[in-house]
Amino acid sequence: MRGLGPSFFALQPAQALPEPTWVAVNDALAAAMGWAGWMTGSEALALLAGNAQPPGGTFATVYSGHQFGSWAGQLGDGRALLLGEADTPMGALEIQLKGSGKTPFSRMGDGRAVLRSSIREYLCSEAMHGLGIPTTRALAVVGSPLPVRRETVETAAVVTRVAPSFLRFGHFEHFAHTAQDIAALRRLADTTVLRYYPELVGSAQPYAALLEAVTRRTAALMAQWQAVGFCHGVMNTDNMSMLGLTIDYGPFGFLDAFDPAHICNHSDDAGRYAWARQPGVALWNLHALAQALMPLIEDTDTALAALEPYKTAYPQAMLAAWRAKLGLRAERDEDGDLIDELLRLMAQDRADFSITWRRLAGFCSAPGAAQAADRAALRDLFLDREAFDAWALHYAERLRAEASVDIERARRMNRVNPKFVLRNHLAETAIQRAREGDFSEVQRLLKVLQHPYDEQPENEADAGFAPDWAAQLEVSCSS
Ligand code: AMP
Ligand code: MG
């Protein structure tokens, strides 16, 4: 980022964070980065609290973007600062503080993040990584008694995030539309290709190739989100990664009772970012990226052609994901109907998304197994038992037709249908304890979520239905 020149960022020291303490340290990530020893020292706490400066200083990048479908103009890292890039065994990683104080891009914001949202980001980044979904990572959370005003007065925290790059669609939109600096836009695109898409260097139309590569990664990411019932909540173009990573965890949620129209962000009145709309919104956002790249691509047809693969890549990836979740190996034309009918029943009866898929692994495909005990637990999730039985008959036939062996199929399904996802109530419990000064639940939950496909019988309670009080939890953009 720094090599791009001063029009891309502002040098900005972090604001001091009083009385910093570790809320959480991600030991597994620290070890993978080769930083485990360093993280135990006092230098790490000072640096990751924003109380010590790295030698080259810290900087905030400028971007713009579309928010809730409207052009929002200039945004930028309003509360994030890059500490720099580190060479690690995982490759080069940018290290970023979030919540480290005001920057020239803070607008009306205070530059801070609260403990609540910082714990949510920390846990969900690692939950997504555990699920095998591309994401920015979270190395640590530092807390402080510093009061921060949101709907109520909360306390401040700083999350350390790491990723190969935090480049967003919004960075490109900024230079195309706000700055209208095409030379800078070209430098940004060239650097992105060179650093993150080196396989595209030398292609006849590198900018269209970049757009297509981002399109394909985004399509794959959307299928992965949908398959685990993840709702991002704020899919604005400034929250879309140029590397196809999940980025900016705010009012996200995982589906409990299945409702395709589920809106996890309390501030999203129109449901623009409802679960079922995410793949379509991603394509809308890719069009915004295409528009930003137009000064470089020049030809509209070429840009549109680069977006075109989304229309096949996403449905193909999604169909493959549903098939895997059903434990199907062969591909048959009628699979789409089998999937649609199950989703329809789940939605109609508000069956729990994760639990339904997980219980499907135990489905007995033998003829006459309709009343078998191992099918009952699944059947119990549906109110319309007749409709479920009719679907189950088709599913059992379909499994037998590909000579599926139940035990082997269950093993495969349990590797794609997570037992543990970060439901709101789990995060909320960890947050409540942390507010009381007990951070052990954050670390315990982190360890559970790092292995979401394992049975973990000792953590059965974390795999259960959302309790009734979870329905009252309101997650908004306020963070
Ligand atoms: P978000 O919806 O969280 O992705 O944020 C949108 C924009 O607002 C980004 O440019 C953020 O950096 C900025 N922002 C969000 N919260 C704050 C805050 N408390 N202080 C300063 N800027 C913020
Ligand atoms: Mg953001």
Image (cartoon, grey):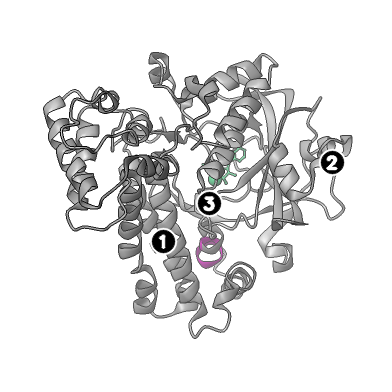
> In the rendered image, which residue does mark 3 sit on?
134
Q: Which residues are magenta?
A: 173-178
Screen quadrant of the C terminus: top right
In this view, the residue in front, 242 or 479, is: 242
| Secondary structure of the residue carrying numbered label 3 | loop
Say what secondary structure mark 2 lies in: helix
Instruction: Determine which residue is flagged by label 2.
Output: 37
Q: Residue at x 80, y 34 (%)?
A: 16
| Sooner in the amino-acid sequence: mark 2 or mark 3 | 2
Please name the amino acid that badge 2 sits on.
Gly
In the picture, which quadrant includes the N terminus?
A: bottom right
Residue 174 part of the magenta-drawn span: yes
Q: Earlier in the sequence, mark 3 or mark 1?
A: 3
Residue at numbered disc 1: 286
Viewer-nearest residue: 376 or 141: 376
Choose top left, top right, bottom left or bottom right for residue 243. bottom right
Q: Nearer the viewer, residue 336 or 112?
A: 336
